[in-house]
Image: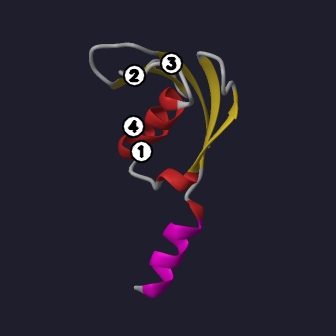
Amino acid sequence: MKIQVTVKTKSKISEISHIEHTNYLVRLKSLPIENFANKELIEILSKYFRIPQSSIKILKGLKSKNKLVELSEGEDSNKREKNI
């Protein structure tokens, strides 16, 4: 699944707001320096969607506030299902 994410950095709290079908607003505490904000974005999306961080990829907008993010189930979840 692909989603559009608008990121606002330097917020007092980290939170996700669902705007429309695939559009989200994410407020982050991190500064947009040395990839800290992108790392925090992946962490917060991982918790929100309950998927591993390895299943989240920023496809477009690494240095922009508007990002295209791909969420996938990933190989880890498939391995877990087979082991059960």
**Marks 4 and 3, how far apart at CA:** 12 Å
Name the amino acid, label 3: Val
Question: Disc 2 or 3, which lies upstream in sequence?
Answer: 3
**Marks 2 and 3, how far apart at CA:** 7 Å
Q: Which mark, by number, is residue 62?
A: none
Answer with left or right where residue 2 lies relative to residue 38: right
Mark 4 Cα-neighbour bin, 10 Å: few <14, some 14–19, many ≥20: some
Please determine whether, in this image, residue 83 is positioned above or below residue 78: below
**Quadrant that contains the N terminus:** top right
The x and y percentages for residue 47 are 36, 44
- The residue lying furthest to the bottom in this view is 83
Residue closest to the eye, 73 or 59: 59
Magenta region, main secondary structure: helix
Magenta highlight range: 75-83
Report if residue 76 lies within the magenta region.
yes
Disc 4 versus disc 1: nearer the observer:
4
Tell me whether circle 2 and circle 3 mark residues in contact (CB < 8 Å).
yes
**Marks 2 and 4, how far apart at CA:** 9 Å
The residue that disc 1 covers is 49
**Marks 3 and 1, how far apart at CA:** 17 Å
Mark 1 Cα-neighbour bin, 10 Å: few <14, some 14–19, many ≥20: few
Tell me whether circle 2 and circle 1 mark residues in contact (CB < 8 Å).
no
Element at label 2: loop
The residue that disc 4 covers is 44
Mark 2 Cα-neighbour bin, 10 Å: few <14, some 14–19, many ≥20: many
**Quadrant that contains the C terminus:** bottom left
Q: Which mark, by number, is residue 28?
A: 2
Question: Disc 2 or 1, which lies upstream in sequence?
Answer: 2
**Marks 4 and 1, how far apart at CA:** 9 Å
Tell me whether circle 2 and circle 4 mark residues in contact (CB < 8 Å).
yes
The x and y percentages for residue 58 are 64, 37
Number of marks = 4
